[in-house]
Image (tube, rainbow, N blue to C red):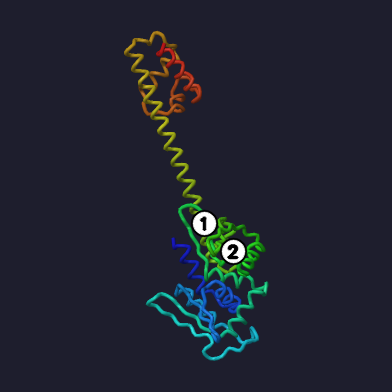
Amino acid sequence: MEKISTIIWDELINLPVANPAAELSGFFDALPRVCSDESVLVSCPRLIVGRRLLKLRKGLNENLFDAKIREGDGALELDKKLGRAAFKLSRELFAAISGRRRRWGEKWAWFRGLWGGCGAFYLPQSGYYMSLRLKDGSETCRLAAGVLNSAGVAFGSRKSRVNVEYTIRDQEGIVTCLSAMGLVRSSLALEETAIVRSIKNRVNKLMNCDSANISKSVDAAVFQLALVDRIDSGGLWHRLTPLQIELAAARRANPSASLGELGQMLAKPVSKSTVEYRWRKLAMIIDE
């Protein structure tokens, strides 16, 4: 099965461009940037993010906002050697795009860009983790928390020196978040993985349970065969009742049978609990 993290990033890159300015605004809020008097340089630590930014830049339309798009405003330079990308644009265009985050109707397009710039997804052996790492105390933190709360997605927060990390650990919350961001294929892949995990866990529990039952049956059979040997060596057959003699003989003839199977082999079949009771009485007689 293809890794979910790979599916998520692949879908994010190839997702159709619906609200490029809103999504770019989310990326700009997440990625580190350097501002000068005339331009803003946004750094992308991963080329995969740079490719998405390039696609969004091509999808921009002058009618989306008041700022004018001039030649050279949105140059994207991919440096494959260093595995980084740089996105340069004018301060005017940067300000116009950044303002899109205030439009609540485009909140999930903005959140998609935000997560693409500073988010991560983890799928360890147990559990699921989807996180966002933001600058503590910033307006972006408040907006991101508002978007998650509006969808009823529960998340935890953990602060470091200057950052705060929002973490979603509930599978349903992660699926809701992925679907709202438009990553439908990823949400379906996560649900499929959850089903496979559930089945594997169920099978493992059943196998462990069967193994434990087999171990108990073997231990009981060994103990009961030892009792039969003690009856022989001590010449105690005359002290046993006919039912106890029948039980001891059945065990000697069927050393690998379980207690339930042993009870069904008797002339008058009895339950497992009855077999256990008779063995306890027999052990008390031998110990005396």
Quadrant for the C terminus in the image: top left
Give the residue number, with chain letter if any, for mark 1: 128
Graded by Cα atoms within 10 Å as few (under 14), some (14 to 19) or many (20 or more), the crowding at tag 2 reads: many
Q: Label 1 to label 2, Cα distance in Å?
A: 13 Å
Name the kind of residue labelled 1 in the image: Tyr
Q: Residue at x 57, y 70 (%)?
A: 112
Q: Residue at x 43, y 80 (%)?
A: 78
Question: Which quadrant of the view contains residue 287?
Answer: top left
The image shows residue 110, relative to residue 235, as above or below, that is: below
- SS at circle 2: helix
Q: Residue at x 61, y 68 (%)?
A: 138
Give the residue number, with chain letter if any, for mark 2: 177
Q: Nearer the viewer, residue 85 or 55?
A: 85
Q: Give residue 54's position: percent from left, percent from top.
A: 50, 80
Looking at this view, name the residue that lies furthest to the left.
Answer: 233
Name the kind of residue labelled 2 in the image: Cys
- Residue 13's mark? none
The image shows residue 148, relative to residue 35, as above or below, that is: above
Q: Nearer the viewer, residue 49 or 199?
A: 49
Q: Give residue 169's position: percent from left, percent from top.
A: 55, 56
Q: Nearer the viewer, residue 180 or 90?
A: 90
Quadrant for the N terminus in the image: bottom left
* Image label count: 2
The image shows residue 25, relative to residue 198, as above or below, that is: below
